Structure formats: C-alpha cells, structure tokens
Image (tube, coloured by chain):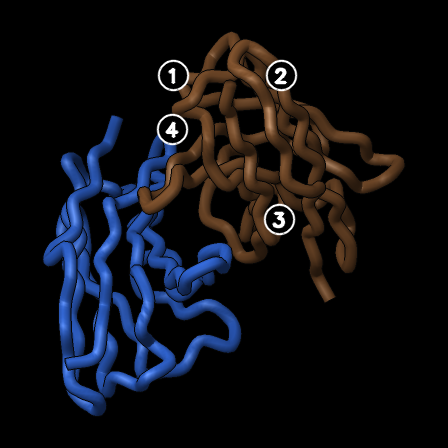
Chain colours: A brown, B blue
C-alpha cells in the first residue's frame, strides 16, 4: 500500500535551517510528483511547492522563493524539503503529499499524505 | 493568485441531516479545453493530515462514502454530505489546482447540532 513516512519533529532557533524527509513506498516513486503543504497551529493549509520526482523540476510558492529547496533521492524513494532563515512564523506542521495524477507536469491534487512533521521555531 | 473563499466558516448539523459547504474562487478554475474544473475537497480531523474526498469538482476519491458529493463549475462549488454521520465531524477545505500557487480555502468546521 502507498505510504509516505516523514521524519520526526524538529526544534530550531530563528535563523537556522531545517530539512524534512518524506520516504515513499508502495508505488513507483518517479511516477508521481510530490508537493509540500504546511499548516501553522490552528490555521489552514498553505502550499509551499512541488517537485517532479521524474525530472526534478520544481515550482515554489513565491513567498518562499529563496528560502525553500525541494529535492529527491530516487535511489531511496525519498523527497526532501529544506527551509532556511527560519522565523517564528515558520512554526507549523509540514506535510508531503503525493500528486494524484501520474506523470503530471504541474502540481495538482493529492491522494496520499505523510503523517506530518512539526517544526517549531523558537529562541 | 486565485483566492478561495469558503462559507460558512462553521456549521452545525443534526445527525442524519444534510450539510452543505460552499467554495468560491476569485477566478474561474474551469479549463474550457477539457471542460474540467480544477477543484478538490479535503476532510481534516484533529491531529491528522487532510483526507482527499473529491477531485475534478465532482469525482469521489477511492473509498469515499457516496454520501459525499461535489458540484459546481467555474467559480462556485459545493460539497454536500447527504446524511451527516458522527465520523464526519471535521474541518473541510476546498483547493484549486488550476494555476500555481495552489491555494486552499480557509476551511469550514463541521459539528454535530
């Protein structure tokens, strides 16, 4: 069965960086893109960006451009999201999500989600 | 960016009754070339990731009970739960994937009356 398993919770100081992993199993990793979505405490869902697991193409939210980097390691079927220059308003649960449509060249809708990784930014 | 606005923000419905949640986009999410509306719905329970319900505005995801249905086109969409069950208590989000950035509605909290 399809599973996305994310790395554990992180506590970081303002200005630091964090890298969250998302290990996929149960399907051909390169057939579906991965998006990252975050959710601040008690708030709604915010799309951060997308990566094609086939080509490595990325599409980032404008507000995070320059601070976020999404990568994949196809040898381990793992996607990564790195966020630098962390601020207190980056405190959130970070989710990876699998694109519903195989081979999509743009981000779309999501059929499987990771369990979430809480990143806390505090001095 | 396409702004997604849901109404109401919260809703209380009796068990067995119909629940209706609306979602309006600031511009059309209908692709006239393929006649598809790039609109999805998710359910989120506390402490869990979102659970996909509907895509292409009206297609149920695998395993979703048929009491959940989606309708609408262009800029106005509706999620309907035909007969509310206790396990449907959750926050519901609409999402457009017509263009990037992908955007979500603010969420509608559904409770039992």
Q: In this view, does B109 lie above or below A20?
A: below
Whole-Å distance between the Cαs marked 4 and 1? 12 Å
CB under 8 Å between discs 4 and 2:
no
Q: Is residue B35 something that shows in the picture?
A: no
Which residue has dot 1 on it? A63
Q: Which mark, by number, is residue A17? A: 2
Quadrant for the N terminus of chain B in the image: top left
In this view, the residue farthest toward the right is A75
CB under 8 Å between discs 3 and 2:
no
Q: Which mark, by number, is residue B85? A: none
Provide the secondary structure element on which disc 2 rests: loop
Q: Is residue B52 left or right of residue B92?
A: right
Q: Which residue is drawn at 32% across and 37% down?
A: B103
Which residue has dot 4 on it? B100
Q: Nearer the viewer, mark 4 or mark 1?
A: 1
Query: B28 and A8: which one is in front?
Result: A8
Q: In this view, does A24 lie above or below B41?
A: above
Q: Which of marks 1 and 3 is in front?
A: 1
Q: Which mark, by number, is residue A102? A: 3
In this view, the residue farthest toward the bottom is B16
**Earlier sequence position, callout 1 versus callout 2:** 2
Q: Residues within 10 Å of mark 3 (few under 14, many from 20)?
A: few
Q: Residue at x 59, y 23 (%)?
A: A12
Q: In this view, does A23 lie above or below A61?
A: below
């Amino acid at each position: 069965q399809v599973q996305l398993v994310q790395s554990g919770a992180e506590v970081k100081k303002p200005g630091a960086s964090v890298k969250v992993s998302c290990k996929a199993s149960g399907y051909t990793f390169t057939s579906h893109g991965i998006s990252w979505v975050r959710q601040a405490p008690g708030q709604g869902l915010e799309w951060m960006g997308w990566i094609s697991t086939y080509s490595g193409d990325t599409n980032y939210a404008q507000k995070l451009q320059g601070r976020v980097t999404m990568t994949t390691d196809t040898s381990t079927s793992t996607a990564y999201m790195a966020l630098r220059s962390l601020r207190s308003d980056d405190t959130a649960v970070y989710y990876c999500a699998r694109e519903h449509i195989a081979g999509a060249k743009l981000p779309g809708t999501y059929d499987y989600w990771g369990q979430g990784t809480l990143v806390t930014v505090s001095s | 960016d396409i702004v997604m606005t849901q109404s109401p923000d919260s809703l209380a419905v009796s068990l067995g009754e119909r629940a209706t949640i609306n979602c309006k986009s600031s511009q059309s999410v209908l692709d006239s070339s393929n006649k598809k509306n790039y609109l999805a719905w998710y359910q989120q329970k506390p402490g869990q990731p979102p659970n996909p319900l509907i895509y292409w505005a009206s297609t149920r995801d695998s395993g979703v009970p048929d009491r959940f249905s989606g309708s609408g086109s262009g800029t106005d969409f509706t999620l309907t739960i035909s007969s509310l069950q206790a396990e449907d208590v959750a926050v519901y989000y609409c999402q457009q994937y017509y263009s990037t950035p992908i955007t979500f509605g603010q969420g509608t909290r559904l409770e039992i009356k």
